[in-house]
Image (cartoon, coloured by chain):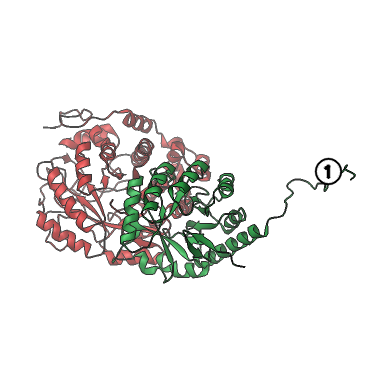
Amino acid sequence: MIDKLIIGGHEFRSRFILGSGKFSLEMTDAVIKNGGVEMATLAIRRANMGGEENILDYMPQGITLLPNTSGARNAQEAVRIARLARELGCGDFVKIEVVHDSKYLLPDNYETIKATEILAKEGFVVMPYMYPDLNAARDMVNAGAAAIMPLGAPIGSNKGLCTREFIKILVEEIQLPIIVDAGIGRPSQACEAMELGVAAIMANTAIATASDAALMASAFKLAIESGRMAYLAGLGRVVEHKAVASSPLTGFLED
Amino acid sequence: MITEQTCHMEYQEGMEATDHQLMDRVLKKTAAYDYNRYTPAQVKAALRKESLDTEDFAALLSPAAAPYLEEMAQRGKEETAKHFGNSVSLFTPLYIANYCENNCVYCGFNCKNRIHRGKLSMEEIERELKNIAATGLQDILILTGESRHASGVDYIGEAVRLAAKYFALVGIEIYPLNSDEYAYLHACGADYVCVYQETYQPEKYERLHLSGPKRIFPYRFNAQERALKGGMRGVAFGALLGLDDFRKDAFATGLHACYIQQKYPHGEISFSPPRLRPIINNDKVNPKDVHETQLLQVMLAYRLFMPFAGITISTRERAGFRDHVIGMCATKISAGVKVSVGGHGEEAKGDEQFEISDPRNVEEVNQAILDRGLQPVYVDYVRV
């Protein structure tokens, strides 16, 4: 079965996008291999080009870099960071993060839409991190986004799909890949999101803070694949409370 | 001239005044904080809560929390991992001058203390910066003594411009400024401001700060707010633990940081928990009741109360202590530290502010972080 994830015309077999901000860098290689990861984020603010402990030195060949604009407080700063990423040779993908709340780190959809529009026009493959709001997602689509990245729960919280109903709406209404970013704390939550029809999962804290990060990466890989297969297979009916007769309301019909 | 006769609660000419609502809230709540009334049940309840309020914070700082230090540490480690992952940031301070106009009885730089004073020229500063940058560091904190005359804002601005050439991140720990002056230093390349209130007890503060601009309590208290108004990205808070009742001072520090974050949600918040250290010419200045156990309790209470805030651990503490608190509550650690004026290759031009306890260089601290399974982070900032 050929089931590829396509973002901005680029094809990926893996639906597991790895966040890298919370790792020990020496684990990167094993986590990427075990997770079957093809795309990993890179915080430009962390790239210590030519210096000590530069994350780029730890990224294996062939991985697609997804530079992010973390640290940006408004659209203008996000745009500048994205351009810097391109100058550094990190490619055309960019994950837009605009945050100006130091406590919850919730994304600012309004500023994110503005940055999406500017960067899409400049030829970036723009993947905005957002609070799952349908109107904002539509605006991001119209602004030229290549995928939409709603949060499942506050970043780092490992709380799972707190925004499940709203993500479902995005899956139903938005024609671009929906990638759940932030909040996925365990493989079962990743699987649950994939069953909903989400196109991919981005995770970092859950793996970085596991006792065995490489093993946890394997667990995420399997969960994401399993959830994807379940979605493609079409989930059967789930009876929530009690068994029901097969046609309780229409069984009286005779012809 | 600000002398012992000057009212320490009144702004002086040239000092930008700020509305006192926030300060009044902190001082009122701190005055009412009776840490002896907290019970183990309240401590346990605080440890069970996901999001802690000021009452929980008060309980964790109380003597009743002492038997729960291990539980606090476990929870601290979890929260630190959730918010910062394995990352531990590295930085170093650079003292560019130690002239001071204040008479603060506990400080090695105090203007009455007969120490060797000095100030680096721009050429010397640049050489020092190059030497520090060669160690791999990307984050620097520029410090001066508190003298507008000897080390004026323009002088500091020039030093910041130079630092921004070599470092991704420049912080300043200097005398408090007006917001337009902070805006100027931000334009020069500074992004973080550290101002320590020393003690949040106004009466004690008055007795410790006998003369000089530092005597004016509210001007110092409102520095973080003026720094954020001036466009700075982050502000650090701290009380010098041991000067007065450390529990009350730590409580006030947390409230101050919390209220500032609520008022300026974009502001990045961090804590520094310095303890008193011995200084030149005064044997009596020594940590009193703040032992390592109490210091750790304070740091963990900060961590659990504001899990997203940075905590910096200074070389005032010994290597063994520092190595254990990174990843548990501290998120930033200094390395290759000199607290004299200059000394990173240049010969020191002025005496030290205090004695340090961890003389390890950058490579050694880097290795210590790796040895604990953590990730040294040299840069976590992009200036745009």
Residue extending farthest bottom: A61
Q: Establish if B15 lies above or below B291.
A: above
Name the residue located 21 percent from the left edge and 31 percent from the top edge. B16
* Residue B303 appears in the picture as rendered: yes
B124 or B230: which is nearer to us? B230
Q: Picture coordinates of residue B190 (x, y %)? A: 23, 48
Q: Colour of chain B?
A: red
Report the residue marked by disc 1: A248
Question: Which chain wears green?
Answer: A
Determine crowd level at label 1: few under 14, some 14-19, many 20+ residues with C-alpha closer than 10 A.
Answer: few
Q: Position of residue A196 (x, y in %)?
A: 61, 53
Quarter of the rendering occupied by the N terminus of chain A? bottom right
Q: Would residue A27 be found to the left or right of residue B232 on screen?
A: right
Element carrying mark 1: loop
Chain under numbered label 1:
A
Quadrant occupied by the C terminus of chain A: top right
In the figure, residue B259 lies in which quadrant? top left
Is A42 in front, or is B353? A42
Q: Compared with residue B224, is residue A186 higher up or lower down, i.e. above or below?
A: below
Q: In the rendering, at what x and y percent does residue A102 appear?
A: 39, 44
Residue B380 in view here: no
Look at label 1 and name its amino acid: Pro
Image-based side of B82 in relation to B175, left or right: right
Mark count: 1
Relative depth, front residue between A118 and B261: A118
